[in-house]
Image: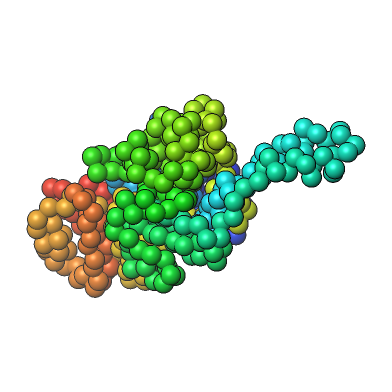
């Protein structure tokens, strides 16, 4: 029986997906095989040697020590696209809140709730909350993944002209994009042409990374009075630069889903408490996707949507023996593994080996059972650092 440790409240729908006779789910315990997590920070967690996989019910894995897991042969999964519709709807809501002073109007009504003539007074005061329409404006979407593509397509139905930027646009995302979305290869086009800009990229450190990409230089290229929306990662925006741009009117509104001591005090900022994926549907979708990834990996060794190991899939484990081998991505590794099986008189019926960076993962269907002597010889190969017999 596999032991699943949860570090957050996960939708109860997972209990319908994980059969009771094969899985035990608990929010405590020391020797567990897999982890289900949402936002809990695992960086200081001491993982047991039994841990095989971590599934994050969401797209980002900043709360998981991915490098440590990779070195230990622990597969880390995420759930890309499972909450995309929920985030898309928040972006659209953010655009509407920025275009019309809905928040100001609501606050005014609450402040004057005891005025018996509020209906009459409201007719005089409503001009203070007048805004603009989205129809006819231009939206720039930075990042056309699961969320960005949905935002771009939906914005078209609201009458906006849409520009999209993504130098790493996948075939799947390209097929999902409406043909009316203008795909540009230049961020400057987004900055210079768009009344609204929404960012949807992962947080990547480094010289050519995305962390802090929306800085003073980027903002200076934007249209006067632009509205900027960030429902992706707080660190994508240099918030000091954004605060200055809001104060001098370069940016009319900053809509962000990341409340912190700086954003909450920004002039003309609309800040929500990380509500992007907080819907019942999104939480269920993420939970189901996460447990399906864990089931497929624990029961068959297949890897899908891992952030630290390549996609490997041999289908259900139906052979007498299936073995997973984590190893360094070095020359002649496949040859050494194959030779070891041959010397032990074991035929390889099916095999796949793929790498990601300096690490690799091999999944092998053997024609007979794999004994301890075979495991010892495989473990003795320099560069092999974790082996798991699946069946």
Compared to residue 80, the image places residue 39 above or below, namely above
Residue 224 falls in image quadrant? top left
Q: Residue at x 56, y 39 (%)?
A: 270
**Residue 267 at x, y percent in the picture:** 54, 31
Name the foreground residue: 217 vs 12: 217
**Residue 144 at x, y percent in the picture:** 39, 59
Q: Residue at x 68, y 40 (%)?
A: 128
Q: How is the image coloured?
A: rainbow
Name the foreground residue: 25 vs 145: 145
Name the foreground residue: 236 vs 141: 141
Q: Residue at x 40, y 38 (%)?
A: 237
Residue at the extreme left: 332
Do we see residue 135 in this rendering?
Answer: yes
Compared to residue 32, the image places residue 341 above or below, namely below
- Is 127 on the left-hand or right-hand side of 56? right
**Residue 5 at x, y percent in the picture:** 50, 44
């Amino acid at each position: 029986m596999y032991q699943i440790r949860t570090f957050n409240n996960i939708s109860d729908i997972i209990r319908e997906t994980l059969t009771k006779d094969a899985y035990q789910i608990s929010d405590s315990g020391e020797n567990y095989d897999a982890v289900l997590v949402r936002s809990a920070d695992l960086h200081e967690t001491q993982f047991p040697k039994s841990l095989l996989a971590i599934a994050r019910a969401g797209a980002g894995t900043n709360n998981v020590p991915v490098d440590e897991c990779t070195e230990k042969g622990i597969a880390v999964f995420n759930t890309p696209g499972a909450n995309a519709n929920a985030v898309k709807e928040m972006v659209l809501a953010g655009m509407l809140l920025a275009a019309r002073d809905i928040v100001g109007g609501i606050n005014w009504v609450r402040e004057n709730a005891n005025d018996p003539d509020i209906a009459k007074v409201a007719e005089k005061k409503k001009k203070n909350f007048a805004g603009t329409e989205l129809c006819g404006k231009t939206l720039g979407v930075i990042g056309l993944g699961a969320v960005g593509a949905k935002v771009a397509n939906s914005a078209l139905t609201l009458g906006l002209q849409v520009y999209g930027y993504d130098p790493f646009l996948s075939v799947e995302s390209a097929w999902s994009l409406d043909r009316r979305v203008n795909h540009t290869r230049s961020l400057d086009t987004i900055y210079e042409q768009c009344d609204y800009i929404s960012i949807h990229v992962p947080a990547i450190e480094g010289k050519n990374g995305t962390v802090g990409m929306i800085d003073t230089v980027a903002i200076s290229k934007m249209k006067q009075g632009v509205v900027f929306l960030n429902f992706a990662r707080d660190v994508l925006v240099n918030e000091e630069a954004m605060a200055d741009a809001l104060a001098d009117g370069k940016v009319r509104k900053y809509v962000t889903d990341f409340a912190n001591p700086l954003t909450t005090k920004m002039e003309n900022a609309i800040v929500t408490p990380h509500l992007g994926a907080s819907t019942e549907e999104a939480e269920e979708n993420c939970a189901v996707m996460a447990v399906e990834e864990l089931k497929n990996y624990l029961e068959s060794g297949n890897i899908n949507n891992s952030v630290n190991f390549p996609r490997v899939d041999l289908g259900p484990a139906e052979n007498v023996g299936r073995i997973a081998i984590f190893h360094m991505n070095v020359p002649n590794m496949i040859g050494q593994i194959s030779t070891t099986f041959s010397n032990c008189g074991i035929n390889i019926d099916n095999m796949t080996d793929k790498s990601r960076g300096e690490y690799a993962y091999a999944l092998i269907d053997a024609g007979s059972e794999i004994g301890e002597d075979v495991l010892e010889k495989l473990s003795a190969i320099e560069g092999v650092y974790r082996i798991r017999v699946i069946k």
